[in-house]
Image: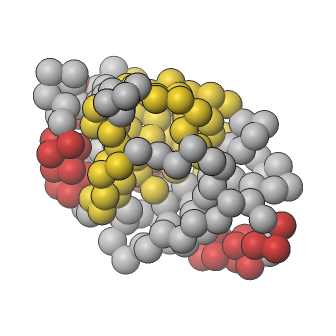
Amino acid sequence: MIGNMSSVVFEYFADDGRFPNNVLPVVIYRRAISQAEVSPEAMEALFDGNGWPSQWRSGIFDYHHYHSTAHECLGMARGSATLRLGGPEGRDVAVAAGDVVLLPAGTAHQRVKASADFLAVGAYPPGQDWDLLRGDPSDRPEADKRIAAVPSPSTDPVGGQGGPVLEMWR
């Protein structure tokens, strides 16, 4: 499935005082699964097969939030959306079915808009359970400590043993 991928983009987001973000880049895999093959089941198979257990199918929250205890992989299984990454002063990223967004722990994200049929699949490295933080000042510095303690994944959710995360996140 990764053979259909047309590009991988790396985006960096700095701590804005409210949202910690991460020194590691967000990784955006464009067309990780082709339009002809993409489905919720195909996205789950991609993640599960690369050692990132899929955990849910849903939309993406429409408010800024982040996870301090896990890296998160979002696979667009249906439709399209605009996501804001990095918090209120971050950047909008258009995503469509077949795209995958990998967020290092601490990276703020929200759904700005989405098509009526939009569906994402969420996956996390083994042993990582996600929390949900909204950028409340009282969350820090404890959230920063948890983010720093989240281990690097042993596989790439799209490329397995050969994906770009293994190099970029070391």
Percent across and percent down for residue 44 are 21, 50
**Residue at horizontal 41%, vertical 51%?**
73
Which of the 4 image quarters holds residue 4? top left
**Residue at horizontal 69%, vertical 53%?**
21
Could you say which is closer to the camera, residue 157 or residue 80? 80
Percent across and percent down for residue 31 are 31, 26
Please say if 9 is above or below 25: above
Which of the 4 image quarters holds residue 96? top left
Please say if 94 is above or below 124: above
Could you say which is closer to the camera, residue 79 or residue 52? 79
**Residue 13 seen:** no
Please say if 162 is above or below 126: above
**Residue at horizontal 57%, vertical 66%?**
132
Percent across and percent down for residue 43 are 23, 43
Scheme by which the image is coloured:
secondary structure
**Residue at horizontal 16%, vertical 50%?**
45
Which of the 4 image quarters holds residue 67? bottom right
Name the side, left or right, on which 115 lies relative to 45.
right
**Residue 33 seen:** yes
Percent across and percent down for residue 62 are 57, 44
Quadrant (top left/top right/bottom left/bottom right) for the N terminus:
top left
**Residue lying at the far front of the rendered structure:** 116
Number of marks present in the image shown: 0
Could you say which is closer to the camera, residue 117 or residue 37? 117
